[in-house]
Image (tube, grey):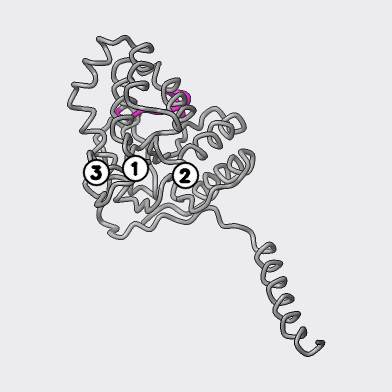
Amino acid sequence: MRRAGFPALVGLVGVGLLIALQLMVPVKFTKTIEWQATDERWAEPAPPEDQIVFADGHITLDRRARPTLGLSAARRYVIEVIDYTCPRCAILHELLRDARDMLPPDIAVVLVFAPQHSSCNDEILEDIPAYEHACSLTRLALAVWLADSTKFEPFHNWLFEHAEELSPEIAQQEAGRLVGENALNHALADPRVEQIIQRDLALAQRIGIGQLPGLIVADRSFSALPEQPRELARQIHRAFKMAESAPPPH
């Protein structure tokens, strides 16, 4: 009995040591964005005062050409890449919303939309039923933003809060209530809705967001999400600090 039990005991001890070592190693929440072609940049045309620069100067976004959350005159920005039907995106949404209360008010969130359904995303080769309404909900969110940007954040929050039971019909009723049905229908017909979706899908692919949600701060991409808003706020603050202390690019 003792001989038979000894290897099992050694195995348990080994597993225990492995778990202990894993717990001792801190989780690496972020990694530096690897921009493959250093001579290529993602640059959206914008006056200097409206430019948001990420990834060591490789990404320049026009802050007025996309929805943002927070102060319109923010000095620092976080990129959040989302799909309203993505369960992990809903988790990040809640974490980030609470974390923003712990961050300086000069930090805002700029949204990049990456709906995971083939009706608007050509990269999706096989649709998953859970993402059936991804494109429709994204179109509605963008239409609300175009119709009345002050109503975007309430609708954005509402979409995530009701994600499990949402249909495009219910979401459209809420959008119409917020901005008015005529304004909503006019915005839904605006070609900019599809243009923004295709632009953002291309940007998400260029950055290398392999799995949603995506979260980018300065020159770092989050590869894991903390469980608590306070830790997320700390990691965002840390990523900004690391970027500020880094030597300027050549």
- Which corner quadrant of the image does residue 77 belong to? top left
Q: Residue 183: give x, y in percent of width and height.
A: 26, 12
Span shown in magenta:
65-74
Separation of marks 3 and 1 at Cα, in angstroms: 11 Å
Which secondary structure lies at badge 3?
loop
Residue closer to the observer: 38 or 169:
169
Q: Residue 227: give x, y in percent of width and height.
A: 61, 45
Which of marks 2 and 3 precedes in the sequence? Answer: 3
Judged left or right of residue 30, residue 138 is left
Separation of marks 3 and 2 at Cα, in angstroms: 29 Å
Q: Which amino acid does label 1 sit on?
A: Pro
Magenta run includes residue 142: no
Which of marks 1 and 2 precedes in the sequence? Answer: 1
Which secondary structure lies at badge 2?
strand
- Residue receiving disc 3: 118
Q: Residue 152: give x, y in percent of width and height.
A: 39, 21
- Residue receiving disc 2: 217
Q: What residue type is labelled 2?
A: Val
Q: Residue 129 carries which label?
A: 1
Q: Which amino acid does label 3 sit on?
A: Ser
Judged left or right of residue 198, residue 9 is right
User: Which residue is pictured at 37% across the width and 51% down the height?
Assistant: 209
Other residues around mark 1 within 10 Å, as few (<14) / some (14–19) / many (≥20):
few
Please report contact status of discs 3 and 2: CB closer than 8 Å, yes or no: no
Q: Residue 41: give x, y in percent of width and height.
A: 27, 49
